[in-house]
Image: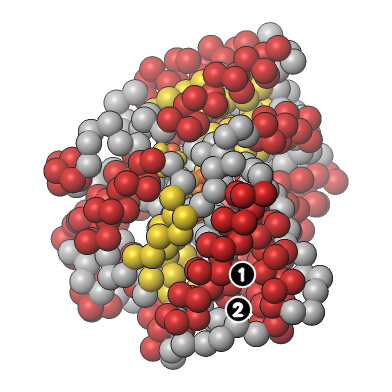
């Protein structure tokens, strides 16, 4: 980071020493994980720049936008509809923390057997190291899993302002009605925070902006179906992670630029790994920055990840929102329709997730699936068994990995992944 952002961080209330410690870990980890990779597309330099400035220039942009009257909304879940926020000229940023921080302080508030994602969010808030959280005018929580639902009762005291959205658990008419009512209640709050009323033209434009972002990610995903694959799984994941932080229009242009470059690679038959490298689909809990442990291990074995069935990946982006309709009611209904399709494991039953995993295996020519779970995440851990059995029954090798944000199990995971990759090679 070129500019001195310390006064800005101080103004946001960050603990500068703790924040320095975080950046001190992140920089080298990023270099080891990403910049050290071979045959990276040139276009990834944009993402390297974004990541190097994620707490600097991007936060300055947010602060400049706030000074100009725009509001920042922070969220932990892909059920928070970006379209509604953009339509009132707001900015949505992802807040999930992909690293452990201040664990002793966290465990004074949460049981030890809480998933790392929730603990990470608490750690970043307690240690005052997340400028996105501090810059948020409204933090939006959601009643998805029990861990999140109950922890928001405590998290409320750690943030400027917390709003909690209720969400359905079943895909039936009652569930759809609840989502509709909750999105309308949320819209009222978004309008209140932003001081603007939603207008049809602005909502349509917001739908187009978010659709364009998702379409660019779809284009990137499709290119990963090529043999040999033109981009690493780590870089594919990174693009999906950056989607939660970056300006959506600039992000879309940057992903499209990479895709142009990858198109050329695919035409020339150039890949980041050998054409014979085992191809793996990762499915399960979301991986937020800097949670790169399992993909690093997998690609370190010579295998390549060709897709993510995850909310930081295709589960979060797979559907577009229709912009058909002439009234705000029509468009809100389209938004309800689109988000109601998300097949998070908090839904019961949740058959479309398994269908999606199977489809992705075919679409991306995957040789096997790694089901990734955070420990103590009941929804995904319980779905892992049926997913694994169903895949194996169809002749698709599957490996279940349950882990957390620590590095203690790295050796053990590597041994299991190596054995799985050997199985895929044979
Ligand atoms: S739509 S996956 S982003 S809820 S890992 S906190 S589920 S115990 S993150 Fe998620 Fe929305 Fe669903 Fe997607 Fe709970 Fe599990 Fe922890 Fe989790």
Are dots 1 and 2 in contact, CB under 8 Å?
yes
* x and y percentages locating residue 419 in the rendered image: 53, 12
Q: Which mark is residue 269?
A: none
Badge 2 marks a residue whose secondary structure is: helix
Name the residue at 30% across, 36% down: 114
Q: List the single residue furthest toward the right.
A: 267
Quarter in which the C terminus is drawn: top right
Residue 364 higher or lower than 408, as above or below: below
Q: Quadrant of residue 141?
A: bottom left
Left or right: 163 in relation to 425: left
* x and y percentages locating residue 108 in the rendered image: 14, 43
Q: Which mark is residue 83?
A: 1
Left or right: 182 in relation to 377: right
Residue 290 higher or lower than 424, as above or below: below
Mark 2 = which residue? 87
Residue 390 higher or lower than 63, as above or below: above
Left or right: 38 in relation to 49: right
* Mark 2 residue CB less than 8 A from any atom of ligand 1: no
Category of crowding for the residue at label 2, using alpha-carbon neighbours closer than 10 angstroms: few (below 14), some (14–19), many (at least 20): many
Give the Cα separation between the discs numbered 1 and 2. Answer: 6 Å
Name the residue at 43% across, 25% down: 402
Camera-side residue: 19 or 32?
19
């Amino acid at each position: 980071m070129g500019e001195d952002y310390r006064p800005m961080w101080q103004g946001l209330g960050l603990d500068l020493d703790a924040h320095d410690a975080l950046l001190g870990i992140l920089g080298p980890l990023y270099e080891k994980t990403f910049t050290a990779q071979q045959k990276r597309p040139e276009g990834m330099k944009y993402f390297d720049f974004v990541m190097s400035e994620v707490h600097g220039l991007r936060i300055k942009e947010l602060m400049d936008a706030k000074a100009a009257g725009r509001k920042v909304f922070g969220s932990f879940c892909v059920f928070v509809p970006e379209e509604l926020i953009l339509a009132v000229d707001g900015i949505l940023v992802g807040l999930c923390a992909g690293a452990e921080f201040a664990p002793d302080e966290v465990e004074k508030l949460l049981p030890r057997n809480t998933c790392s994602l929730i603990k990470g969010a608490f750690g970043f808030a307690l240690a005052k190291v997340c400028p996105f959280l501090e810059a948020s005018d409204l933090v939006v929580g959601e009643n998805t899993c029990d861990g999140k639902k109950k922890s928001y009762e405590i998290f409320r005291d750690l943030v400027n302002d917390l709003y909690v959205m209720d969400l359905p658990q079943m895909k039936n008419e009652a569930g759809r009605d609840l989502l509709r009512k909750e999105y309308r209640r949320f819209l009222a709050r978004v309008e209140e925070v932003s001081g603007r009323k939603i207008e049809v033209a602005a909502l349509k434009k917001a739908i187009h902006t978010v659709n364009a972002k998702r379409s660019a990610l779809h284009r990137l995903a499709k290119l990963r179906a090529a043999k040999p694959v033109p981009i690493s799984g780590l870089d594919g994941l990174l693009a999906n992670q950056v989607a939660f932080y970056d300006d959506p229009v600039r992000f879309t242009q940057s992903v499209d630029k990479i895709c142009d470059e990858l198109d050329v690679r695919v035409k020339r038959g150039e890949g980041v790994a050998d054409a014979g490298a085992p191809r793996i689909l990762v499915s399960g809990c979301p991986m937020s920055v800097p949670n790169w442990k399992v993909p690093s291990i997998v690609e370190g074995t010579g295998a390549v990840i060709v897709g993510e069935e995850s909310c930081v990946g295709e589960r979060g982006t797979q559907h577009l929102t229709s912009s058909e309709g002439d009234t705000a009611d029509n468009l809100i209904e389209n938004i309800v329709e689109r988000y109601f399709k998300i097949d998070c494991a908090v839904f019961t039953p949740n058959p479309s997730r398994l269908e999606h995993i199977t489809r992705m295996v075919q679409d991306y020519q995957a040789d096997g699936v790694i089901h990734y779970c955070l420990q103590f995440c009941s929804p995904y851990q319980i779905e892992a068994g049926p997913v694994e059995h169903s895949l194996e029954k169809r002749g698709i090798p599957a490996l279940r990995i349950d882990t957390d944000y620590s590095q203690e199990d790295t050796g053990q995971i590597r041994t299991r992944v190596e054995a799985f990759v050997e199985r895929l090679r044979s």
